[in-house]
């Protein structure tokens, strides 16, 4: 069962620094410039990312391959630079890619 978010600010956004430890944490071993697709657990509404220090990491809520951008992508289809956290309610997959090999963690909350 995914742990529920305990603290919300005045705008009903989660207080990331106030979150309890997650009981659903994935560790994803990324090879450099190789996209991985991760299925989001049922009931998850928030994912908190633990990035690879010093790496350029990107995400997109799709079940397909993504790439580290090599230049301008101005049609709205670019992956997002990995944020601290993101609402994942209703999404089925997260694709992640990094320019450096390493392990990324994903902590999920209801």
Image (cartoon, rainbow, N blue to C red):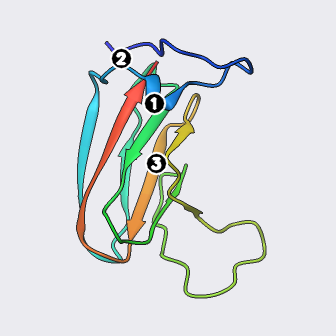
Q: Which residue is mark 3?
A: 94
Q: Is residue 32 above or below residue 96?
A: below
- The numbered mark at residue 17 is 1
Q: Which residue is mark 2?
A: 2
Residue 30 seen by the camera: no
Residue 36 in the image, given as x and y percentages of width and height: 35, 59
Badge 2 local density, few (<14 within 10 Å), some, or many (20+)?
some
Whether pointer 2 and pointer 1 mark residues with C-beta atoms closer than 8 Å, the reply is no
Q: Which numbered disc, 3 or 1, marks the residue that appears first in the sequence?
A: 1
Report the Cα–Cα distance between label 2 and label 3: 17 Å
Q: Residue drawn 42% across and 59% down? A: 96
Secondary structure beneath dot 1 equals: helix
Residue 20 falls left or right of residue 66? left
Q: Residue drawn 69% across and 84% down? A: 72
Secondary structure beneath dot 3 equals: strand
Nearer to me, 15 or 94: 15
Secondary structure beneath dot 2 equals: loop
Nearer to me, 11 or 89: 11
Q: Mark 2 or mark 1, which is nearer to you?
A: 1
Badge 3 local density, few (<14 within 10 Å), some, or many (20+)?
some
Report the Cα–Cα distance between label 2 and label 1: 18 Å
Q: Mark 3 or mark 1, which is nearer to you?
A: 1
Q: Residue drawn 48% across and 16% down? A: 5
Nearer to me, 71 or 48: 48
Q: Is residue 47 above or below residue 50?
A: above
């Amino acid at each position: 069962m995914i742990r529920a978010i305990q603290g919300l600010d005045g705008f009903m956004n989660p207080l990331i620094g106030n979150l309890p430890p997650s009981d659903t944490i994935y560790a994803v071993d990324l090879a450099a410039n190789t996209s991985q697709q991760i299925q989001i657990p049922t009931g998850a509404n928030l994912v908190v990312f633990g990035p690879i220090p010093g790496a350029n990491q990107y995400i997109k809520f799709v079940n397909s391959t993504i790439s580290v951008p090599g230049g301008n992508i101005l049609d709205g289809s670019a992956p997002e630079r990995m944020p601290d956290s993101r609402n994942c309610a209703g999404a089925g997959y997260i694709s992640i890619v990094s320019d450096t090999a390493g392990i990324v963690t994903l902590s999920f909350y209801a």
